[in-house]
Image: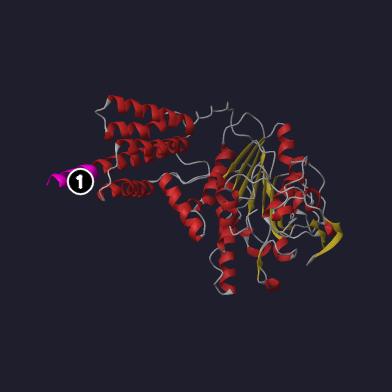
Amino acid sequence: MCATGEWRARVGGAAGFALALGLGEWGARALAGPAPLGPSADPLRGVLSVLGLLALVAGPAALGRRVGWAGAVALAAWWGPEVARGAGRAPAWGLVAVLLVGVVWRGRSVARLGLGLGLGVAAGMVGGGPAPAAAPSSGAPSSGVLVVTVDTARADAGLLDALPAAPPGAAWVHHGEAVAPAPWTLPSVVSLWTGMPVAAHGAGLAAGGGGEAAPAPGLPWWPARIARAGWDTVALVQNPHITPQTVHGFGRFVSAEADREPLLLLQNLDGLRVRRWGGRPLRAAGRDARVLRAAAAAVAAPGDGRPRLIWAHLMGPHEALRGGESLPPEDRARRYGAAVRAAGRSLAPLLAAVPPGWWVVVTSDHGESLGEGGRWGHGSALDGAQLRVPLAVRAPVGAAWGPPAPLALASVLPFVLGGVPLEGGLGVPVAGLRGVPHPAHVWDGAVARPVGPPLVAGAPIAWPAGTADALEALGYASP
């Protein structure tokens, strides 16, 4: 009987600690709200996290292993920085987890409670920082540019079909297609934001050691140029190839790839699942919708009178074919097309919220092969399937716009942002096959023909920590 009572006390104490720690963490994350592009700590996540902690802490106790006060404090001290990091504040939220140890586990001991408080303060200092002060505001800007890039949307897949009509004072002045500078993300977006062909900036070309070359130094990044002219610039992106190391000049760069699962145990378990069996992290679900909401908030956010540039990058069509390799070709193509059209429909609320005095650009970074020439995917061919992308430009009434055909995608933003004359016609330069050194090419309609000597790639990109794992999760080879 005594042994049974001791067993119950041991398990009960361990369960009480796990319950307090789990609820404390969930409460701190729920109060803090979601990361800019990350998921929220919803009640279901909270329940799963508490159940996992109960198994982690009370399980060993039920098997006869005593979970002492020191072990509890050690576990809470590990959790504390994560709680503070999730809440983004110091030191209060890091204090919560370890303080609960002192109160729930051994609240009668003043010395141990003091130690718990000390560990909590240290955890908060390590994990969190004060919330940034709000900038002075005088109303949302009446002029600006919104750029929406939908990853992996080819021109004939129907992205633009669901765009809403322009509001009074604005008009869709070009609605069709353009030629992307490369058939995959990295070289294409660098061209988009510099106005330069891949042959000039070199990003994404095969580099030594099997990696991919970084953009050449000193490029004329349009976000940096307009920021110097007084613009407020914001990037809200997802794709491990799009980082501050590969796209420069934005005053605020928010990447969904940097977001974590709100609760530590679920983050670790899901990471283990992805490393063992592949696939996308659970926190990636619903990410396009979060990017669009963040873009709408950025459009409407009070400012200081400066015009604003906002870039939102979506990933829906890119992810549509994941896990569908075993499907019949017609089903794979149907799934892809449905994802592209759904992405177009999802833009309607954001575009309806953009004032008529803004320019709006809707496009893609590259297309997708759907069996043409025996190819599936992108990055493998300089042809129409992988280089023709949708393009729609909404401009204030009276704005000049006279694009040539075919239009080079890389020439659109320099014109919209800086009034640089558009270039196009049969001289649209393209390049950038994945991992293959090759000469520059010029688009001539159905195929691209090589011109000039082979390019020499520059230094490999210094990818941030975790980017290699994110690239593998997207189906890319590690850099």
Evaluate whether residue 173 shows in this view: no
Residue furthest to the right in view is 452
Q: Quick one: 454 or 28, which is closer to the camera?
A: 454
Tell whether position 233 is magenta.
Answer: no
> Residue 390's image quarter?
bottom right
Residue 90 to residue 17: above or below: above
Evaluate whether residue 22 shows in this view: yes
Residue 74 to residue 163: above or below: above
Q: Quick one: 209 or 249, which is closer to the camera?
A: 209
Magenta: main secondary structure equals helix
Percent across and percent down for residue 69 are 30, 36
Percent across and percent down for residue 109 are 26, 27
Q: Residues within 10 Å of mark 1 (few under 14, many from 20)?
A: some
- Measuring 13% from the left and 44% from the top, which residue is drawn there? 2
Percent across and percent down for residue 8 are 19, 45
Asked whether, in this view, residue 403 is left or right of residue 68, the answer is right
Q: Which residue is mark 1?
A: 7
Q: Quick one: 79 or 3, which is closer to the camera?
A: 3
Q: Quick one: 381 or 400, which is closer to the camera?
A: 381
Asked whether, in this view, residue 403 is left or right of residue 11, the answer is right
- Measuring 42% from the left and 38% from the top, which residue is drawn there? 78
Q: How many marks?
A: 1
Which residue type does callout 1 highlight? Trp
Percent across and percent down for residue 354 are 61, 43
Magenta region: 1-11
- Name the element at disc 1: helix
Q: How is the image coloured?
A: secondary structure
